[in-house]
Image (cartoon, helix red, strand yellow):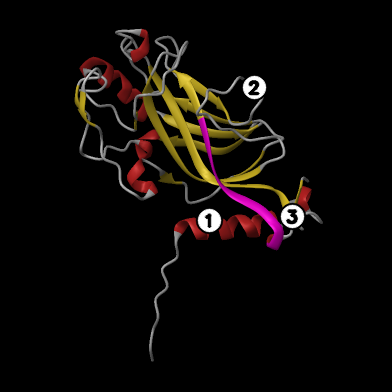
């Protein structure tokens, strides 16, 4: 008897899970049709400036709570999204006048961040994360250690004259993304928030800030799928 092995692509598997879930969401009953559904790959990107006086940071995942920075992306109120993977990075820029010319790193680097700031930034990855919808906890106390990713080839040179950047691979896991396993579905009409709580300790050096442009900022990346209504006869319909 011949046995065949099928390898399921995780992204396609996640899409199928989302399609099946959409068919059972009450607010979409009578509106959702898998054959005409407008479903797209989607990434939520949100930023928070680190502070020497705060050990907890709340990221609002929907638009309207604050002005978006140019590279940020959040849920629209009409969106239904499923989150499959998460990454938590650190990027250097001036929060008051951001210039996104620096890479996002997913672990403290003693050359890029400096020795003392690098030690302080470990508190990010020794901390934990929580996903909430309103007062409902969806993910409780996820260890940020699973979001710490160092590709091995670190930053080289100086901020002013870099000679090499970390080398990330083609797969999501090689770019610092952690697969959640259980995939929460988010309704854009509700208040969805991701909280990052740092480990205890001295935060004196966590901002860095040798110059304002070198300030350390948290970057939250949530990868998944988003549903934005139906497409039929060349006309996009909202629900």
Check if residue 42 falls in the magenta segment.
yes
What segment is highlighted magenta in the picture? 35-45
Residue 47, can we see it?
Answer: yes
Packing grade of label 3 (10 A; few <14, some 14-19, many >=20) is few
Compared to 82, does 188 lie above or below? above
Q: Secondary structure at mark 1?
A: helix
Q: Residue at x 82, y 56 (%)?
A: 30
Q: Residue 153: x and y, percent?
A: 20, 37
Residue beneath label 2, please?
Answer: 65
Q: Earlier in the sequence, mark 1 or mark 3?
A: 1
Magenta-highlighted stretch: main secondary structure?
A: strand
Compared to 128, does 232 lie above or below? below
Task: Tell me which corner region of the image, top left, top right, bottom left or bottom right, holds residue 161.
Answer: top left
Instruction: Tell me the tag on residue 14.
Output: 1
Q: Earlier in the sequence, mark 3 or mark 2?
A: 2
Residue 115 as seen in the image, left or right of residue 141 = left
Q: CA distance from mark 3 to mark 2?
A: 33 Å
3 or 2: mark nearer the eye: 3
Instruction: Tell me the tag on residue 234.
Output: 3
């Amino acid at each position: 008897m011949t046995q065949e092995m099928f390898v399921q692509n995780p992204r396609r598997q996640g899409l199928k899970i989302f399609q099946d879930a959409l068919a059972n969401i009450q607010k979409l009953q009578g509106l959702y049709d898998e054959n005409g559904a407008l479903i797209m790959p989607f990434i939520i990107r949100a930023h928070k400036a680190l502070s020497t006086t705060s050990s907890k940071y709340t990221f609002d995942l929907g638009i309207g709570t604050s002005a978006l920075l140019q590279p940020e992306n959040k849920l629209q109120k009409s969106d239904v999204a499923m989150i499959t993977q998460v990454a938590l990075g650190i990027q250097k820029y001036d929060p008051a006048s951001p210039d996104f010319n620096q890479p996002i790193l997913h672990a403290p680097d003693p050359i890029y961040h400096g020795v003392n700031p690098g030690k302080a930034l470990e508190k990010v990855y020794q901390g934990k994360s929580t996903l909430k919808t309103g007062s409902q906890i969806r993910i409780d106390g996820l260890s940020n250690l699973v979001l710490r990713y160092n590709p091995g080839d670190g930053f080289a040179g100086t901020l002013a004259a870099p000679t090499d950047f970390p080398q990330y691979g083609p797969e999501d896991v090689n770019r610092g993304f952690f697969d959640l396993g259980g995939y929460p579905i988010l309704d854009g009409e509700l208040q969805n928030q991701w909280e990052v709580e740092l480990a205890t300790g001295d935060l004196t050096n966590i901002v860095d800030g040798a110059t304002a442009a070198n300030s350390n900022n948290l970057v939250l990346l949530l990868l998944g799928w988003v549903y934005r209504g139906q497409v039929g006869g060349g006309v996009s319909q909202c629900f």
